[in-house]
């Protein structure tokens, strides 16, 4: 059964999640004696910090997309090299046979520019096979093992480039899923920590209570900061 995709539990950037976690950890260290009364130990806090560090060091999507783009560019270059080698052979074949003949069509190179990666690989292998079958007839137009070997090597390089590119796509999918899963773990822990922090200070200290409020955006933070300053001025 296909694994269900993992959805993010938070709707702000990963960088903001990390910063919010580290900020709340700082407050929890300050209030650690209070937290231990809720069963939230120093060891659990250390574990939270370790997961934040792990999250920070995961490659972000820009890095992964960049790697994928590099392998795609290499794959494209390898495909062009293969097409050039095939066209060079087919120019010779056309000199021997009409490009409307069955012998020419047997190579199956029509609409080569529209072929998928898999179709192009199969086309290259077919061209090699058919060329070897007819090598005695095509010798007079310069078709020999050197020409065929050029196509064979280009097919191998292109297939290798395709596999590497597909691996990078899979690596990105896996990495994105791992990042979402760890991000969700951090968010759950952040919510737990903040709920405890708010409960500690709800009746005694408004400013410290606000320290444990999770904001969905920078605008939310600005509004809260203004409200806090307003309250402090009124008290003064």
Image (cartoon, rainbow, N blue to C red):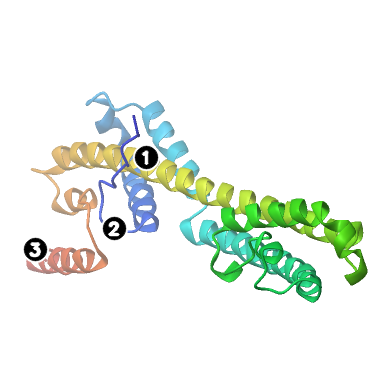
Q: Quadrant of the N terminus?
A: top left
Please give the residue where the numbered disc 2 appears in the rendered image: 12
Residue at image position (80%, 76%) is 95
130 or 191: which is nearer to us? 130
Q: Are marks 3 and 2 in contact (CB under 8 Å)?
A: no
- Image quadrant where residue 121 sits: bottom right
Percent across and percent down for residue 199 are: 14, 38
Of callouts 1 and 3, the N-terminal one: 1
The reply to whether residue 193 is in sight is yes
Left/right placement of residue 92 relative to residue 205 reads right
Quarter of the image with the C terminus in it:
bottom left
Alpha carbon of mark 1 to alpha carbon of mark 3: how far?
A: 43 Å
Q: Secondary structure at mark 2?
A: loop
The alpha-carbon separation of the residues under discs 3 and 2 comes to 33 Å
Residue 190 position within the rendered picture, expressed as x and y whole percent measured from the top left: 28, 42
Q: Quadrant of residue 109?
A: bottom right
Name the disc covering residue 235, or none. Answer: 3
Label 3's element? helix
Q: Which residue is mark 1?
A: 181
Residue contact at pointers 1 and 3, CB within 8 angstroms: no
Which of the labelled discs sits on residue 211, or is there none? none
Give the crowd class for mark 2: few <14, some 14-19, many >=20 residues within 10 Å.
few
> Sequence-wise, which precedes: disc 3 or disc 2?
2
Residue 87, percent from left and from top: 73, 71
Q: Is residue 176 left or right of residue 193?
A: right
Label 1 or label 2, whichever comes before in sequence order: 2
Q: Nearer the viewer, residue 62 or 106?
A: 106
Q: Which of the pair 192/175 is nearer the observer? A: 175
Which of label 3 and label 2 is nearer to you? 2
């Amino acid at each position: 059964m296909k694994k269900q995709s993992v959805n993010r539990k938070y709707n702000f950037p990963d960088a903001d999640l990390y910063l919010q976690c580290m900020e709340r950890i700082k407050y929890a260290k300050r209030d650690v004696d209070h937290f231990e009364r809720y069963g939230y130990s120093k060891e659990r806090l250390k574990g939270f910090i370790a997961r934040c560090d792990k999250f920070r060091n995961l490659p972000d999507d820009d890095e992964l997309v960049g790697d994928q783009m590099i392998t795609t560019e290499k794959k494209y270059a390898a495909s062009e090299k293969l097409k050039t080698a095939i066209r060079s052979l087919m120019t010779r074949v056309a000199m021997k046979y009409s490009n409307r003949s069955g012998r020419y069509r047997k190579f199956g190179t029509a609409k080569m520019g529209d072929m998928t990666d898999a179709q192009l690989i199969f086309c290259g292998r077919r061209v090699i096979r058919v060329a070897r079958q007819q090598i005695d007839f095509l010798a007079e137009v310069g078709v020999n093992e050197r020409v065929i070997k050029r196509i064979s090597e280009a097919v191998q390089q292109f297939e290798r480039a395709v596999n590497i590119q597909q691996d990078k796509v899979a690596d990105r999918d896996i990495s994105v899923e791992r990042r979402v899963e760890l991000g969700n773990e951090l968010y759950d822990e952040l919510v737990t920590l903040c709920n405890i922090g708010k409960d500690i200070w709800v009746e005694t200290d408004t400013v410290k209570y606000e320290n444990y409020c999770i904001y969905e955006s920078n605008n939310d933070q600005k509004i809260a900061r203004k409200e806090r300053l307003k309250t402090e001025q009124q008290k003064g």
